[in-house]
Image: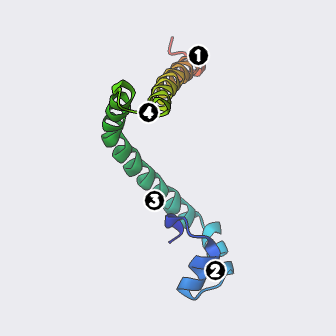
Amino acid sequence: MLLDGKPSVRVAEELSITQTTIWRWKQQTEFTVAYREAKREISARTREMLQEVATKAVTRLFELMEDPETPASIRFASARTILEMHFKGIEVEDIQTSVEELKQLLAPSTS
């Protein structure tokens, strides 16, 4: 339930426990490790789902942008979204490159 994003108050009510019990769980290392891992798994599955539909979404945006029957405001919004995604991708690649370069600089020398 907590992984579904429900607030602790609601989870406590639904499980007929106190909020203090949930607070105590969150203080336990085993709970926090398991909770964090479960959140990572959910996040990974979500990213996989997004990757699957991303190509379709970009294709649809491109179709809208190119279709003369599409209202100008929608064509403009589609073009803007495509450009924003493009530049965001470049930013992410630049950050990844910088992180890799920093890792190499900080890595202990094996000479």
Q: Residue 105's image quarter?
A: top right
On residue 74, which mark appears?
none
| Neighbourhood count class around disc 2 (C-alpha, 10 Å): few under 14, some 14–19, many 20 upward | few
On residue 71, which mark appears?
4
Left or right of residue 108: residue 79:
left
Q: CB atoms at circles 4 and 3 under 8 Å apart?
A: no
Q: CB atoms at circles 1 and 3 under 8 Å apart?
A: no
Q: Position of residue 14 (x, y in %)?
A: 54, 84
Disc on the earlier residue, 4 or 2: 2
Query: What's under tag 1, amino acid-wise?
Result: Leu
Mark toward the viewer: 1 or 4: 4
Query: What's under tag 2, amino acid-wise?
Result: Thr
> Tag 1, which secondary structure?
helix
Say which residue label 3 marks: 38
Disc on the earlier residue, 2 or 3: 2
Disc on the earlier residue, 1 or 2: 2
- Residue beneath the point at 59% across and 63% down: 29
On residue 21, which mark appears?
2
Seen in the picture, residue 39 relative to 70 is either above or below; the reply is below
Q: CB atoms at circles 1 and 2 under 8 Å apart?
A: no
> Tag 4, which secondary structure?
loop
